[in-house]
Each structure stands twice: as structure tokens, then as C-alpha cells.
Amino acid sequence: MPKNKGKGGKNRKRGKNEADDEKRELVFKEDGQEYAQVLRMLGNGRCEAMCIDGVKRLCHIRGKMHKKVWIAAGDIILVGLRDYQAYGELPESTRLNEGIAGGLDEEDDGPGDDYIEFEDEDIDKL
């Protein structure tokens, strides 16, 4: 049976929560940042938040704070805006990462429209 060579188990990884009841100091926003209130947690390190400027945004919790700083619905957070959000380059109505322009979201009319069938002799020519 192998010896344990680590420096502790899961209790050591959890650490001590001495400052659990203590409120954190408010970090003031800079350019490209906005205050927001968490509406709901979505899982996978994401949450939905309502920013002070009136825009509802999907937020991603950075890896440094993921599982170290617990965020719940109703908490006030500081949201770092992406360059195109901070400078207003793209309008708010632009949908990002929701399919390719050209109709991935549309219904297919017939079965098999997306597939090309090859005969065995066509494959041999390749």
C-alpha cells in the first residue's frame, strides 16, 4: 500500500473561513468597468447581472475568484466590460455567438438537406 506523500487532504484544501462574516471593501470602478447586481447564478462560473446603466448582461466569473469568492443572487459585483461594450463599437442589438449569420436558427424544411451522399465510386476517385 503506498504512503500518502501529500500535505493534507480535502480539509486542508478548504482552508479556514475566519473572515467569512466580514464584508468586503468596495473596489471603485475604472474605465471599462461597471457596477452590477447579480440576478441569478447560471452555473459553470457564469451569472446574469443587471448593470447600473440598465443593461442586463451575462457575466463570467474569473478563474482567480471561482470557488474562492462565493457570489449569490443579490450581490453587488464589478463587471469588466469587453472593448466593444465599453466603447460602444457594436450596438446592443447585435447577437454574438448565437449561430452563424445564414440561418442556423431557422427550421429545416426537409429531411436530409444538410447531408451529401457519395457513391462508392466517387470516394475511390478521391
Image (spheres, helix red, strand yellow):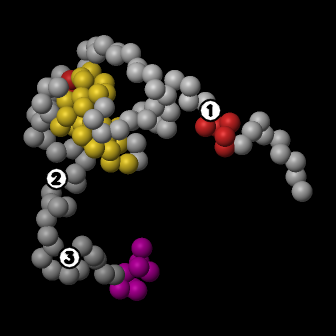
Amino acid at the residue labelled 1: Gly
Distance of label 3 from label 1 (alpha carbons): 56 Å
SS category of the residue bearing label 2: loop
Badge 1 or badge 2: first in the primary sequence: 1
Q: How many labels does the image show?
A: 3
Image-based side of 123 in relation to 6, left or right:
left
Give how far across and how far down residue 33 sits, in percent: 27, 21
> Residue 118 — which label?
none
Task: Kindly give the residue lying farthest to the bottom in the view shown.
Answer: 120
Taking 34 as reference, is 10 above or below it?
Answer: below
Q: Is residue 116 visible?
A: yes
- Which quarter of the rendered picture does the N terminus lie within? bottom right
Give how far across and how far down residue 80 sits, in percent: 30, 25
Q: Do the residues bearing badges 3 and 1 touch, measured as CB atoms within 8 Å?
A: no
Amino acid at the residue labelled 2: Ala
Q: Name the residue under label 1.
A: 15
